[in-house]
Amino acid sequence: MNKNVKTLIITAAFALVAFQFKVSADSSLGSPRINIDTNKEWTVKFSSNLEPSTVNSTNIQVTDKNNVQVPVAVTLGNDPSTVLVSPKVSGYDPSEKYNLVIGEGLKSVSGKNLSNPLSMQFTTSNKYSDGTSYTDLPKITSNKFEYEPLLSSEKQGFFIQCDSSSDVQYRIFVNGQNDKDGNYTELTNGYTSEDSGKITALKTLSAGTNGQKYKAVIYVKRTGATGAHKDGNTEYDNYFVDYFRCVDSIDAGSNEYANYDISLDDMVNTQLNSDSTPVFVAANVMDNAATKNQIKYYADPNNFLDSYGKYQFLKLTYADGVTADSLNNFLKGKGIFDGKGQAFLDAAKNNNISVAYLVSHAMLETGNGTSKLANGGATDSNGNYIYGVPVYNFFGINATDDNAVLNGTKTAYENGWTTVESAISGGAQWIGKWYINNPSTNQNTLYKMRWDPGNPGQHEYATDISWAYKQIPNIIKEMQDITAGSNLTLEFEIPKYK
């Protein structure tokens, strides 16, 4: 079995004494475990055979850091004194604390209850997973989607590769990112054999309001056999996680295309092997390593060809059409930026940057002018500015994850950004020089700033693989507000890989 997902046997040493279970280790199954794979399947070994009806998710639970029960599969092992606790669908969340709890309702075959509840804390590693790797069982090695993106009128097709020489079948479930309850919808009718080399979904999916990302969990098992493992969806031998996007329509207007002499797969592999680890920031944890399939989803331009998703391909170079007055109308009430329309317009013109983008970027990085970096920077315990004067960093330049405020303040001080105007001008100059107008990289879209497709993995603005996509709602809203009544034309450049 793969070393990252192999079963850890925890022995809870019980003796049948005085007509009850007796636990030898008070109420703990040992020291907290750390760096646990998100696909971990726990095996708990008892000294007595168990009453099968008590081996359930009421008496044996996994809870999260808030003591909320996590939906795991609890089954009796081949040995009647062994319990298997399989992770929730597609695995635990990375970098999270959980507790494995064995309650007093668990009984031996003789009907005796456990005398004391047991618990063990474990913390998962900071890595997402593309699936399980149980050895000596069929394993999915890759998947290719028939439609990228999927239209809401189409039924997705899955071209699946498996390393098994025996007959296998597949079962597919999907979860939409807008489903906050984490519910999964089955696209097959139980386990299904390939037809003409693919599995075709039996139903269409919703694109939501602005397109929807779907996580697909593709299960495989030997035909005619019961799966060796189990989760909340099904029993399985191994599973594979992949991602696709569903949209209502593709927007072909105002698009240019740029060809790159590299395949998408090569581009993704380069990202995986770069010095800067690509991460996926789902909430506030900033360092969870992204998987190959997560990277592929966000790096693939074909997933974002609708009128919403393509805003990450918007050209960010300067174009006339926006006035200082319209900017000031937008900036009214935006904290330190109130009345600074001319400063943004001058910085944009002087550095060949879209003024709508420049303002939108500043709003995003500073929380509409409310952040610490937008209001003088880091201070000491007495509230004094650490460099003796207020400094400003409106674009998150060098505000690295280890200490964003301190590092961003240091950059602002070293560059002399001691006024709002100098910080707007200096930040625009930095972005223009190193990204948008850089003659070597020509990173004049959000997508290119994140991925640097001409030289992947070398010169990228962010480590979060979803960074470019996350800018879209603010970019759209604020650009619409900023450009209202102007004659500004938006142009898009879509990358094409060989």
Image: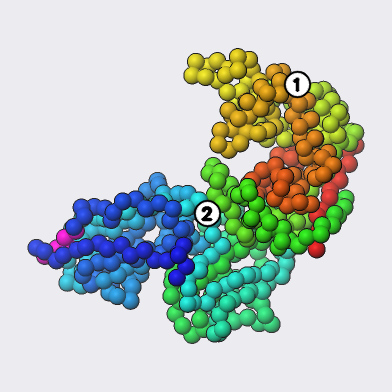
Q: Nearer the viewer, residue 310 or 143?
A: 143
Q: Which residue is mark 1?
A: 422
- What amino acid is found at the position of numbered circle 2 in the picture? Lys
| Residue drawn at the location 47% of the way across and 71% of the way down | 134
Q: CA distance from mark 2 to mark 1?
A: 40 Å
Q: In the rendered image, which quarter contains the C terminus? A: bottom right
Image color mode: rainbow
Q: What main secondary structure does the magenta stretch of the protein show?
A: strand
Q: Quadrant of residue 103?
A: bottom left
Q: In the rendered image, which quarter contains the N terminus? A: bottom left
Q: Which residues are magenta?
A: 19-23
* Res 234 seen here: no
- What amino acid is found at the position of numbered circle 1 in the picture? Ser
Q: Is residue 51 left or right of residue 121?
A: left
Q: Is residue 473 left or right of residue 234?
A: right
Q: Which residue is mark 2?
A: 127
Disc nearer the start of the sequence (2/1): 2
| Residue drawn at the location 37% of the way across and 48% of the way down | 67
Name above or below for residue 336 compared with residue 39.
above
Crowd class of label 2 (few under 14; some 14 to 19; many from 20; radius 10 Å): many
Dot 1: what SS? helix
Q: Is residue 51 magenta?
A: no
Name above or below for residue 311 compared with residue 355.
below
Rendering coords of residue 492 (x, y %): 84, 48
Q: Is residue 401 left or right of residue 36?
A: right
